[in-house]
Image: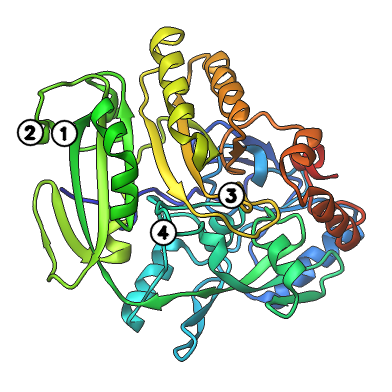
């Protein structure tokens, strides 16, 4: 069994080209101006100049969002030259990094410092700011999303000034944690981390109904529990999942789950076909190819299994051509105003459409099911929310909108897509 420590290429920013597209190729824009600042002062100057010209400003990140969240026809920025860990507070276990630092780079720096992230997702190529402020998460019944570890940040304002956000400004902190760059350009993030730990990972194949019977037990027993439900024999190949047929006790190849559990361990590092022990950030990521367009919603824990069964049913009966796996993970509730997990423990259920096919009716059907169960979307993955929907499903949405308008009354940090949601 192998996993990648740098599993997806960082999208090419193309400083000399007006055209830009995301990693998956489903979002693109033509930029009037591009910028690649090398320090915070240059970043502030670029933002200030764009504001004086009435240009919108967005940051590309690593281009891993499936939504238009990074797009702009104004000034498009890359923070790829502003990266790296800037300071470590070993006593409080807090690490400050530049916003352009990738998750992979951050993990390597923590490993060298004898520290670990509290939790991590299964992709590590995104920029730190982009991943965290869109609500990216891993899995774990008692573990929040990645943004819940943010204890401080800097926000560049339209006039080029800097707001320092920390626990002394709780409203700004809870608004900024998941804000998609709409409150200002994030230049620096401070994260609460923990002592270094190794993870023991095990993967296996199990029949769907068997996993449903063990669902609660597995979630409580293991620090991390997740699975991919595969409707067909070839489904696991879409996500480059390993062939675990040898681990199945029934020999089934359809309607099965590719199960993964991970737990902290003191065991020394080793690796076999279906088992691995290694440093935390060397275990979390898996390898993906840009061959899917994903939708994901966080559903309240109380409705988790019912929502999953409903999506599985519509895939098997109404959309048999939908062959991509469902990914199913756990995340604890948090206090970020626009977090998909705001004040509710949740599971995330994701589905994907195949690029080049008309998958919209399928995604809309899944969207309707998951919203019926109280789902909220991952901001970096496909969804169908309107501005009115945002106000309806996020209890602190009006507070967020008021704060956004106060900080950026001209909407410099909005785009066509974000303006429909947050103007």
Element type at marker 1?
Answer: loop
Per the rendering, the mark at residue 418 is: none
| Point 57% across, 73% down: residue | 98
User: Disc 2 and disc 4: Cα gap in Å?
Assistant: 28 Å
Per the rendering, the mark at residue 246 is: 2
| Point 29% across, 47% down: residue | 218
Of 406 and 342, which appears nearest the observer? Answer: 342
Give the image quarter of residue 269. bottom left
Pointer 1 and pointer 2: residues touching (CB < 8 Å)?
Answer: yes
First reached walking from the N terminus: tag 3 or tag 1? 1
Position of 255 with respect to 184 (left or right) is left
User: Disc 3 and disc 1: Cα gap in Å?
Assistant: 35 Å
Element type at marker 2?
Answer: helix
Q: Residues within 10 Å of mark 3 (few under 14, many from 20)?
A: some
User: Disc 4 and disc 1: Cα gap in Å?
Assistant: 24 Å
Q: Which residue is mark 3?
A: 344
| Residue 105 in sight from this viewpoint | yes
| Point 41% across, 59% down: residue | 120
Residue 232, above or below 222: above
- Spot occupied by residue 229 in the image (x, y as percentages of width and height): 32, 29
Q: Residues within 10 Å of mark 2 (few under 14, many from 20)?
A: few
* Image depth: mark 2 or mark 3 in front: 3
* Image depth: mark 4 or mark 3 in front: 3
- Spot occupied by residue 413 in the image (x, y as percentages of width and height): 79, 53
| Point 40% across, 54% down: residue | 140
- Spot occupied by residue 90 in the image (x, y as percentages of width and height): 44, 89
- Spot occupied by residue 64 in the image (x, y as percentages of width and height): 51, 45
Q: Which residue is mark 4?
A: 120
First reached walking from the N terminus: tag 2 or tag 3? 2
Residue 141, above or below 19: below
The residue most toward the bottom is: 91
First reached walking from the N terminus: tag 4 or tag 1? 4
């Amino acid at each position: 069994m192998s996993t990648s420590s740098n599993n997806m290429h960082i999208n090419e920013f193309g400083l000399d080209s007006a055209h830009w597209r995301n990693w998956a190729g489903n979002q693109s824009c033509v930029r009037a101006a591009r910028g690649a600042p090398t320090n915070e002062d240059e970043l502030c100057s670029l933002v200030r100049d764009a504001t004086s010209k009435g240009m919108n400003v967005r940051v590309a990140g690593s281009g891993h969002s499936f939504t238009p969240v990074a797009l702009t026809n104004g000034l498009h920025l890359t923070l790829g030259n502003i990266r790296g860990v800037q300071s470590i507070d070993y006593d409080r276990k807090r690490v400050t990094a530049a916003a352009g630092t990738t998750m992979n780079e951050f993990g390597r720096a923590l490993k060298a410092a004898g520290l670990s992230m509290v939790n991590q997702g299964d992709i590590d190529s995104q920029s730190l700011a982009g991943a965290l402020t869109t609500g990216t998460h891993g899995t774990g019944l008692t573990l929040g999303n990645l943004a819940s570890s943010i204890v401080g940040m800097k926000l560049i304002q339209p006039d080029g000034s800097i707001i320092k956000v920390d626990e002394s400004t709780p409203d700004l902190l809870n608004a900024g944690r998941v804000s998609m760059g709409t409150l200002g350009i994030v230049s620096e993030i401070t994260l609460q981390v923990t002592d270094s730990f190794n993870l023991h990972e095990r993967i296996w194949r199990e029949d769907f109904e068997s996993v449903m019977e063990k669902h609660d037990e597995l979630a409580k027993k293991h620090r991390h529990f997740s699975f991919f439900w595969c409707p067909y024999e070839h489904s696991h190949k879409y996500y480059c999942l390993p062939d675990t047929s040898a681990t199945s006790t029934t020999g089934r190849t359809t309607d099965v789950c590719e199960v993964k559990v991970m737990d902290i361990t003191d065991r020394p590092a080793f690796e076999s076909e279906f088992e691995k022990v290694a440093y935390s950030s060397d275990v979390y990521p898996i390898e993906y190819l840009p061959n899917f367009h994903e939708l994901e919603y966080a559903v309240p824990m109380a409705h988790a299994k019912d929502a999953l069964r409903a999506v599985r049913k519509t895939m098997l009966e109404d959309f048999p051509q939908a062959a991509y796996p469902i990914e199913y993970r756990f995340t604890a509730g948090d206090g970020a105003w626009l977090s998909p997990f705001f004040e509710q423990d949740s599971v995330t259920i994701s589905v994907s459409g195949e690029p080049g096919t008309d998958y919209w009716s399928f995604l809309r059907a899944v969207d309707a099911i998951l919203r019926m169960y109280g789902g909220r979307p991952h901001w970096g993955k496909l969804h169908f929310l309107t501005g009115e929907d945002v106000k309806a499903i996020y209890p602190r949405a009006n507070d967020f909108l008021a704060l956004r308008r106060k900080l950026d009354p001209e909407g410099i940090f909005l785009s066509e897509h974000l303006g429909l949601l947050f103007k």
